[in-house]
Amino acid sequence: MATPIFTAPDPQELIDAVDATHSALIKVRALLCMTYGNSGEAFRSMSGEYQDSFLWAISDLVDNAVAGFETVCEARDRAASPATSN
């Protein structure tokens, strides 16, 4: 009879994913602070090309944060799904 085996997520994988997510979100927060209020004047005075590049960089950082979060979720799901052993 097969016995379910629960496997713990790799701690280093989780640490790396959380670090990558945190790093990307800190950068996004800093960049977005430059787009509104008094700080936003500099952003709004940039050419359209620079504004597009700025927002593209933010988009890439958000993608990195999402990827890190998904890695954590996948590790959680793997740990919650028992493997079977005979």
Image (spheres, rainbow, N blue to C red):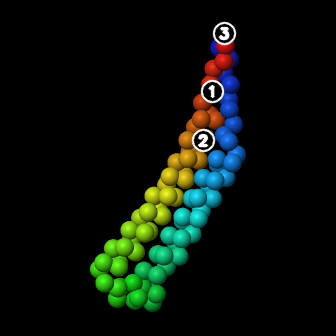
Image coordinates of residue 60 in percent, x first then y, are 44, 63
Kind of element beneath mark 2: helix
> For the view shown, which residue lies furthest in the top direction?
1
Whole-number angstrom distance, CA of label 2 to CA of label 1: 12 Å
Image coordinates of residue 1 in percent, x first then y, are 66, 9
**Amino acid bearing label 2:** Ala
Tag 3 near tag 2, CB within 8 Å: no
**Amino acid bearing label 1:** Pro
Kind of element beneath mark 3: loop
Give above or below for 40 relative to 63. below
Kind of element beneath mark 1: loop
Q: Residue at x 59, y 62 (%)?
A: 22
Question: Closer to the N terminus: mark 2 or mark 1?
Answer: 2
**Amino acid bearing label 3:** Met
Q: Is residue 40 left or right of residue 29?
A: left
Whole-number angstrom distance, CA of label 3 to CA of label 1: 14 Å
Q: Residue at x 58, y 58 (%)?
A: 20
Q: Is residue 47 left or right of residue 74?
A: left
Give above or below for 23 relative to 15. below
Q: Which of the two residues, 67 or 53, is positioned nearer the viewer here?
A: 53
Q: Which residue is mark 3?
A: 1
Q: Which residue is mark 1?
A: 82
Question: Closer to the N terminus: mark 3 or mark 2?
Answer: 3
Rendered-image quadrant of the C terminus: top right
Give above or below for 15 relative to 77. below
Other residues around mark 2 within 10 Å, as few (<14) / some (14–19) / many (≥20): many
Q: Residue at x 63, y 59 (%)?
A: 19
Q: Is residue 81 left or right of residue 65?
A: right
Q: Which residue is mark 2?
A: 75
